[in-house]
Image: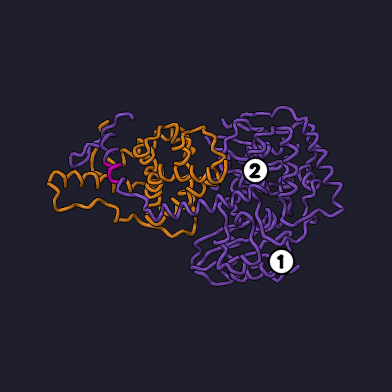
Amino acid sequence: MAPSEKMNEITRLVEQYGDDVLRTAYVMLKSKELAEDAYQETFLRICRYYDSYRKECSEKTWITGIAVNVCRDFLRSAWRKRVTVTDDFSAHISESDTQEMVEKKDEKEQLFRSIMKLPDKYREMIHLYYYQELDIKEISRILKIPGGTVKSRLFKARNLLAGMLGGEANG
Amino acid sequence: MAENQKKGRNGMLLDDDFIKKAYTAELKQFKASDELIETTLEKCRAELEGGGKKRRSGFSWSRFALTVGAPVAACLLVLFILFSQPMGSKYDANYAPQASGASEMANASGNAEAPQALDKDSGSLNLIFSESLVPERTPDAGAQAVQQFGLTSKSYRSPNVLNSLDYTYALTPVSGDLPPETVEAILDAYNQAWGTRYTCDVNKVLDVSTLKVGGITAEDLSKATGFEELLGEQAYHMVPLQDENHANSLLLPVVESAESYDDPTAAPLEIVYSNAGRTWLASMYSAIPSNDDQIAFLLDREEHKRLVRETYKVKQITGYKIIDINHGYDFIILIEADGKEYAIPHLTVGSPGTLENHKVYQALDVLKALAERLKTP
């Protein structure tokens, strides 16, 4: 493929999957700045490895896998400064919101904050399953772990969430 | 999506649908800015232009192996071994016969039978070689083979660029852990290939960082403020092999691959081990010979830290890395302590120049010394 054609494809991928990549990076790295670095690095790697994509999995799974690997690299970098959960990403409540809307926003925000406080391996699981809507097999492929481990982590993640929100498991 | 319900303290129903909707709604507020998109596309354009130039003169192992197949891949493997050694190195005339021997062995592998597949611990192990490829089965056959292939230190000339073993074809910059069962399986494969009985302490496997792809010049070294900025994305593992006398004698590089290689003949290296969705590659020809003392020092992480503590009276060690600066032969042991980088040269082939081997220095001093060494004809 000619570089110009490839560039068109990369532009399409950035437009189609860019926000998802950024969100995945944010959830994994818990920092806007690092997420933006990871976003750029992910698409650079997509450029490098574009020819090796053999369509054995969906484009979304392939790109998510690269993004997850980039984030893991960032997390594994022994000398990278530790970052804490940022608060600047929470929903803002406007004065025009009704009481019901405020409560609903509170619930969503509370849930989101709880997810962001989950240990890395459970947080990435929740993200891949609920946000990216990947199935067990796809998550297993991306994280390079058996499907059984994916299921058990997902189960544990839900229990942890219920626990963090002070609830009890019902099902 | 299976339905799951868990109830929170305040009556919040934690079912799949709520988690999905609430989480997605919060996350969707986060979008890539136009500036970020613009910058990223510019970098991608530069990458593609640069990469395009490289590809015209470069070589993609995985693609080539897939296209041409096993017999030709075996020949190319030998070429890869020969050309992947220190940049600028050329074989001395005295070593020509050995190189020729390597070619003969490569030709022999042209008649290689189908890869053998073994099951080990539910993983799959594939060795792409035939009996005819194995020249001699003696306890030291592995090391001898390395020498037959001209891979001894004597065959090198001083490179003018520092470079690491190049595993970019593995397509995975991530180097996670190397599970003990993987080490054992690859060691079995190596021993089976050479008829040797090397052993390995699975707790002593090294994680090795590499330099940026393309190598590091004297100018790069002079400009650098630390080693960290010279590092590339790829990492690999070095498995120390002990002979029957329990002496360290070889270092076997192992790299995790993003490709699973359902067809092992398509893999760029001939030992392919897959387990639990992960795949590792090693070559029966790429073990690096060294002596017991040298390897023992490289493995002695505590001694490296002690050297830094005693020499510079540091309080807290916060980082530790082993960097391959010469194709798996020479290393810099990099230690971060009290916010500074310290470096211990471990050079088995390259000239130490003004540096003293196994002595701890401030990283900047080592960068300067290495730059000087590269400038010296």
User: Are callouts 1 and 2 both on one chain?
Assistant: yes
Residue that lies at the very extreme toward the left in this rendered image: A99
Give the chain letter at badge 2: B
- At a point 84% along the width and 55% down the height, the residue shown is B92
User: Does the stretch in magenta take in A29?
Assistant: no
Which amino acid type corresponds to the residue marked 2 in the rendered image? Ser
Percent across and percent down for residue B7 are 22, 37
- In the image, taking residue B127 as reference, residue B315 lies left or right, namely left
If the image is split into quadrants, where does the C terminus of chain B sit? bottom right
In the picture, residue A163 is in which quadrant? top left
Q: Nearer the viewer, mark 1 or mark 2?
A: 2
Relative depth, front residue between A54 and B332: A54
x, y percentage for residue B200? 65, 45
B199 left or right, relative to B335: right
Foreground residue, B192 or B71? B71
Report the residue at 73% width, 61% height from top.
Answer: B350
Parent chain of label 1: B
Q: Position of residue B105 (x, y in %)?
A: 80, 38
Chain displayed in orange? A
Is residue B249 at least partly visible in the picture? no
Q: Which residue is mark 1?
A: B352
At mark 2, the secondary structure is: loop
The picture's colour for chain B is purple
Question: What predominant SS class does the magenta segment belong to?
Answer: helix
Q: Describe residue B285's horizontal placement relative to residue A115 as left or right.
A: right
Label 1 or label 2, whichever comes before in sequence order: 2
Range covered by the magenta-colored residues: B22-27
Q: How is the image coloured?
A: by chain
Q: Is residue B279 visible?
A: yes
- Tell me which amino acid carries mark 1: Pro
Q: Which residue is mark 2?
A: B60
